[in-house]
Amino acid sequence: MSLERSSGLRSVRLLSVFTFFFVALTQIPAVSAHGATATGGLSQRHGIVLALIGIVILGGATILKRRQAITSTTALIGVFLGIVVTALGAILFEGLSPDPSYMASSMPFPRSWYPLLSLSIGFLIMIMSALVGWFRWPTRPRYTALGTMMGLWITYPYLIPGPASYSHPLGYSIVLGTPVLVGYIIWKDAGHVLRAVLQDRVARRFGIGVGVVIAFFFVSATGYLSFFPDEGLPHERVITVLPAIYQLVKWPVLEVYLPHIPLFVAISPGQLIIVGMLSTLIGLNATLIARHWRVEERAGMTEGAAGSAAIVGSCTCGCCGPLVAKIAVLAAGPSIAAPLYWIFVDSASPLSTLFIIASIVLFTGSLIYSVESVQQSASPTDIAPAD
């Protein structure tokens, strides 16, 4: 009972800290509404400082865990707190930074290259998937199917060119079929281990928490959730449904603007599918890492996986280009930032789509690899619940 009570108190403290930062973030513009500035005296540098504090907390918890100065559970609490603070700092930085604007002449290469790049990259991915599947995993054709699906993501806009692609059944099939195929692969190759790992309450809560924070970051970074609405918006509440293209095809988007909070939120089925899939994959990886820490198996490998997930996870969505460009403006100036901006933000760019599908494959592959490593090195009791 004491362990359960202690775990419950830790969860309450974590929820309280997250709620405090969340409420503070939502109140920044409300305070400034009565002042002379639009940000209450805050600037993008405050977001940078907050993000750096989060990185220090995350790194400190990891180092202390390596030195066995703290328990695994305490380290996970520190890592989660660091992720929360870092995400809030990045959101604050993105919300308070001026939106960069670039001329088409600053593009790294002309749009006329896009069809050739898209078709070449897409078909190359399909061919490589077939070859790798044939020679490396002949008994797992689902991997080749996933590679083929990823190739279709890139080639689709030019297989069905023009406005017809925005509502073609093939486009919807690709978007809707991807999470189904990814879910089948995970269920087939990792389901039995994940079911056992998810019985560990600490690991399960850590994974859910990380997934929620990452989803919050993705939605904020892509502009679907904002506490810093653009100037010129109406002063009354707005609730409307508009069609918008998001990831290959057109979706109905519910937009809600509440000026008194202030809050802007937009929800679409395509957004829920992509953000939900990526956040779930990252959350499952985080759960497995937490479980490895709890049983102290392969500590070096799992810590390395955690670092890779933190780096890649922050840049998973191709629509994070404006945030990357804003950071580049501070670091190297507009001349360096412009190509990055176009590569990430131009929805027609095959590199933007490639970044998204690479993230899906990376997180799915790392999850399967980690599960198979556990199976090869551990006995069945090693993945039983720890509490």
Image (spheres, rainbow, N blue to C red):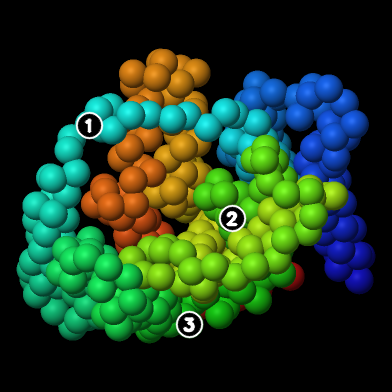
Q: Is residue 375 left or right of residue 24?
A: left
Query: For this rendering, which residue is in front, 235 or 347?
Result: 235
Q: Is residue 260 visible?
A: yes
What residue is disc 1 on?
108
Q: Which mark is residue 224?
A: 2
Query: For this rendering, which residue is in front, 133 or 371?
Result: 133
Task: Give percent across and percent down for residue 278.
Answer: 48, 62
The amino acid on which the numbered mark 2 sits, given as a three-letter code, is Tyr
Up-down relation of residue 257 to residue 132 (above or below) = above
Query: Mark 3 and mark 1 in contact (Cβ < 8 Å)?
Result: no
Q: Secondary structure at mark 3?
A: helix
The residue sitting at 36% across, 42% down in the picture is 344
Task: Give percent across and percent down for residue 167.
Answer: 33, 76
Q: Is residue 315 left or right of residue 54?
A: left
Location of the N terminus (image quadrant): bottom right
Up-down relation of residue 95 to residue 270 (above or below) = above
Q: CA distance from mark 2 to mark 3?
A: 35 Å
Q: Quadrant of residue 370?
A: bottom left
Q: Nearer the viewer, mark 1 or mark 3?
A: 1
Which is more N-terminal, label 3 or label 1?
1
What residue is disc 3 on?
192
The residue sitting at 33% across, 66% down in the picture is 248
Q: Nearer the viewer, mark 2 or mark 3?
A: 2
Q: Is residue 65 left or right of residue 185?
A: right
The residue sitting at 50% across, 18% down in the picture is 330
Which is more N-terminal, label 2 or label 1?
1
Up-down relation of residue 16 to residue 176 (above or below) = above
Task: Give percent across and percent down for residue 65.
Answer: 63, 41
